[in-house]
Image: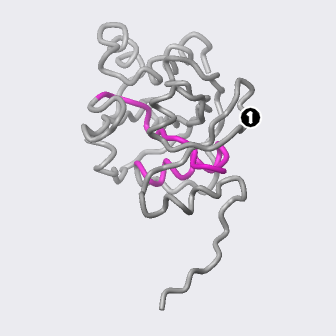
Amino acid sequence: MLTIQPCNLPNSCPSVVQNIFMKEEIFDVVNEQDEVIGQKLRRLVHRDGDMHRAIHVLVFNERGEIFLQKRSMLKDTFPGVWDSSASGHLDCGEDYDACAVRELREEIGLVATVCPGRMFKISARAETGQEFVWVYRCVHEGPFVLHLEEIERGEWFAPEFVTQWISEKPGDFASAFVYIWRKLATEGK
């Protein structure tokens, strides 16, 4: 006999239970002030252009190089292009800091004992796919264990090289990363 035990899901996310077996993510949908106004399946959020939440973590080494990931060809958005060291959507009910720690672990195998430092927040816009994004920074030397379903490969790059590469071939990168990198360059964070 199958016994169903109660779980400790956030009360604002009852639809998570209905979708556990579907293995489809549920996102919090937010308004212009980044306040949660509902929940929706990932594919519907992207299809409908709803505002939602994400993080990007930029991992630098002691030499000042940045670790970038080349996204897997299996990704539903921006397959096969270069992106931040780790990035991802917030799960339903999750906060930005918890997501940053989780995405570092899931994507590149970096177990953070503290949350990376917050750099800046970007309002939802076309370049981010209507995502409000907190951008984080940390220093680590690697090596990393890449989640191969998400990341084809990763490499260290000098910031000057990335800047030149973006200016010559912005299509080689996810649009959110291009926006983040340009903001970083102009604001000197």
Q: Secondary structure at mark 1?
A: loop
* Amino acid type at image mark 1: Glu
**Callout 1 environment at 10 Å: few (<14), some (14 to 19), or many (20+)?**
few
Q: Quadrant of the C terminus?
A: top right
The residue to which callout 1 is attached is 35
- Vertical placement of 57 versus 175: above or below? below
x then y, percent, for residue 50: 57, 29
- Residue 164 figure quarter: top left
Question: Residue 10 in magenta?
Answer: no
Q: Position of residue 76 (x, y in %)?
A: 34, 36
Count every numbered label the image shows and give the total: 1
Q: Residue at 44% across / 18% down in the picture?
A: 178
At which x and y percent is residue 174?
A: 39, 24
Q: Residue at x 45, y 24 (%)?
A: 177
Q: Please provide the residue range marked out in magenta.
A: 81-107
Front residue (pair 131, 178): 131
State the residue at coordinates (52%, 41%): 89
In the rendered view, would you say 46 is above or below 151? above
Q: Is residue 75 above or below residue 32?
A: below
Asked whether 21 or 163 is in front, the reply is 21
Could you tell me which residue is drawn at 43 percent across and 37 percent down? 85
Give left or right: position of 161 versus 43.
left
Whether residue 106 appears in magenta in the rendering, the answer is yes
